[in-house]
Image (cartoon, rainbow, N blue to C red):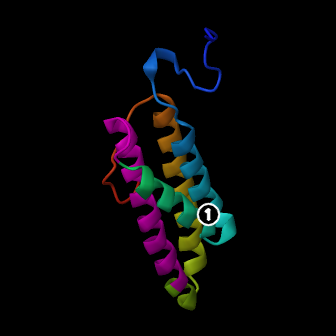
Amino acid sequence: MNDSPDNHSVIEPKGTPDITLPIVVYALLLAGVVSGGLTAIVGVVIAYVYRGQGPHWFDEHYRYQIRTFWLSVLYFAISGVLTLVMIGFVTWLLAVVWLVVRCVKGIKRLQEHREPDNVDAWLI
């Protein structure tokens, strides 16, 4: 018999779940600005797959990430149309700032092991 502890399992302090995957999803959403949205698509797929497999505050983060993705698609699409009247570049920049602020707020709340504020908000 082998009485040595299992070194392959991750032991979290105070029994809290590992927050690495939701942080990766936030990072993929942010990287979508540079990759033209490709990494954001991967991130939202991960959020859809892992939604419902953790505590309530985890699910709220996945919901927040999914909503952030779809709202960013809307905001960037509107910016694309508005480029025809030369204001789209400004709205695109505002959409990037919105995305960064929303993801940073989500990461901060995730590190506190709390659900994000204003999940259903259209802005920040």
Residue 5 position (above or below residue 37): above
Q: Residue furthest right?
A: 34
Report x, y in % for residue 105.
49, 42
Q: Looking at the image, which residue is at 63% across and 26% down?
A: 8
Q: Residue furthest front?
A: 1
Which quadrant is home to the N terminus? top right
User: What residue is shown with label 1?
Assistant: 39
Q: Looking at the image, which residue is at 65% across and 21% down?
A: 7
Q: Looking at the image, which residue is at 55% across and 20% down?
A: 11
Which image quadrant is residue 61 in? top left
Residue in the foreground of this view, choosing between 25 and 18: 18
Residue 102 position (above or below residue 87): above
Report x, y in % for residue 69.
46, 63
Q: Looking at the image, which residue is at 56% across and 62% down?
A: 42
Residue 37 position (above or below residue 48): below
Segment colored magenta: 52-80
The amino acid on which the numbered mark 1 sits, given as a three-letter code, is Thr
Residue in the foreground of this view, choosing between 61 and 71: 61
